[in-house]
Image (tube, helix red, strand yellow):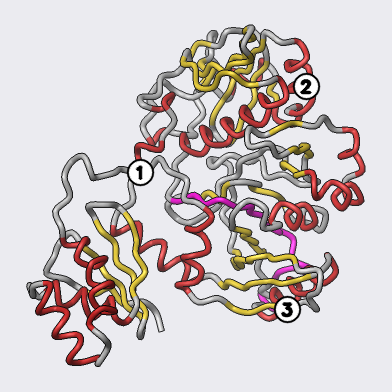
Amino acid sequence: MPYQRIQLNNQQLSVWLEEDNGIVFSNQTKSLLKLSPLSIALLFAFDEGLTFELAIKQVQDVSGLPSDQISAAAKQIKLLFTEQSDQQQKTYADGKYPELKPHNKQKNPQTGFVVQVTNSLFCITSDCDFLHNELTKLLQPIILSSQEVSSNDTSSDTSSKNKGANSPNLANPEIDFVLHIMVFDEGYALISNGLTVEEGLTQLQLVPILIDRLQILAYQQSDYCFGFHGAALVNNQPTQERNEHNPKLATTILLPGVSGAGKSTLASELSTKGYALYSDEIIAFDDNFKLLPLALPMAIKQGSWAHIAMLYPQLTEQTEWHRVDGRILKYIWPQQIAKITKAEQVQTDTKTLMLCPRFDAMANGSSEPLSVMATLELITHGGYQLGIELTADKAEQLIRFCEHIHTEKLVYANSEQSHSLIDKIINSHE
C-alpha cells in the first residue's frame, strides 16, 4: 500500500501515512522524521489544537499506554509545532561549497591540465611536481585536450536551465573551477577559485581531498534533485537482446550506505561484469531521478586491496594515499565508466534495485526485502549531500521513488554468494 499524503491544519508540516507507519516533513527544520503509531496519534492531537496535557490524556484513554511513555514521545512531536527562531532554522543550501556562493567562472590560466566531471571543467595546477605528475597519471581518463576544453566551454549564464548546454568555441574559454596546490613550510594547501579551502595537509593527504572536492563541486554544480552517499552502476546490455517479445530492461544497481559497508568492493566486482560505474561515492539524481555520472576513480581502502587486486592487478602498482581520518587507500578506474554528460545522456528504461550489502564471514548467503521506511532510513543514514533546499514536494518525490524501486538487504561471506544473490534478485524482477 503506497504512502498517502494527509492534509494537516498546520501548514508548516506535511505527513504521509502507510498503515501504522508515518513520515512527517517540517518546513521549519527542513527535515524528515519517522512516525510510530504513538507519534502519529500525538501529531494529530496537537494538530487539532490540544494542549500538551490534553493530548497525552486523549492518547492514553485510547491506547492504555503509561503516561510517562506517552509524555516522552509527546515532547519530540511537540517540537514540530514550536515556532523556530531565525537562529535555530537551518538550510540545506548551507552545505554548498564556498566557491558556489556565488559561483563565478574563471579564466583558464593555460597552465596545469583540465578535467571534466559531469558538466564542470576543472583546471588543476600544482607547485609540487610530484603531485602534478601523480594527478596527471591518475586523472588521465578525464583530462581534456585544448581543443576539447574550447568545445566544452559553457556560456557565462550559470542558471540551471543553461547548465550543460555547449557554446561555440571561444578564444579564451572559461573554467568552472581552478584548483591550485600550494606548498608551505607548515604543509600543503588547496586553493579553489582564489579561496583557501584546505590547509595544513601532508603530501599524501592532498590527493583524496582534491578528488573529493572534484566530486562534490561537480555534483553541486549540476542540475540535481537528490544525492546520497553510495555507489551507482548501470548495465545497459541485458543478458538477452531486448525486443518486443523480450522486453528486458537495463538494470540500475544502487549501493547506498555508510563508509565501510562494502559497497566499493561490490561496485568494483560489478564493474567487471558489464556494469558501468556512474559514481563511487555519491548517488546523484536529476529531477526525473535519472542518474548523474560522476566520472572519477574508485577509492579502494586498504582492507580490500588483496581481493580487488585479483580483479584489477594494476592496483598493486598504485600510490598509497591517506585520508585525514587516517584511512589508507588507492585509486583505480573501473573497466566501464559512465563519462557522458547530462546533455548527451540517453534516457533508457531501467529497473532499479537498491542493495544494502553486509559482509559476514559465517553467512550462508541470504537476502530480504526492505520496506519503504527502511529504504528511506538506509539512504538518509548514509548521508544526504547538502547544497539544495529540501521541501515537502521534494520529500514526496523521494517517497514515491522509494516506493517505485526494490530494496534488498544482502548478507554474504564471499563474492560468489553476493553475485548469486544479485542475479537471483534481478531475475525475479524481470
Report which residue position mark 2 lands on: 134
Residue 115 location, x and y as percent? 64, 25
**Residue at disc 3, secondary structure:** strand
Q: Image point 81% across, 46% down: which residue?
A: 335
Quadrant in the rendering for residue 351 = bottom right
214 w.r.t. 70: above or below: above
Q: Disc 2 vs disc 1: Cβ atoms closer than 8 Å?
A: no
Residue neighbourhood size for the residue with mark 2, other residues' Cα within 10 Å, grouped as few (<14), some (14–19), many (≥20): some
370 w.r.t. 10: above or below: below
Instruction: Specify the quadrant that holds the C terminus.
Output: bottom right
Quadrant in the rendering for residue 17 = bottom left
Residue 134 location, x and y as percent? 78, 21
Q: Mark on residue 366?
A: 3
332 w.r.t. 183: above or below: below
Cα distance in 3D space between marks 2 and 3? 42 Å
Q: Mark on residue 92?
A: 1
- The answer to whether residue 360 is left or right of residue 83 is right
Residue 86 visible in the displayed image: yes
- What amino acid is found at the position of numbered circle 3 in the picture? Ser
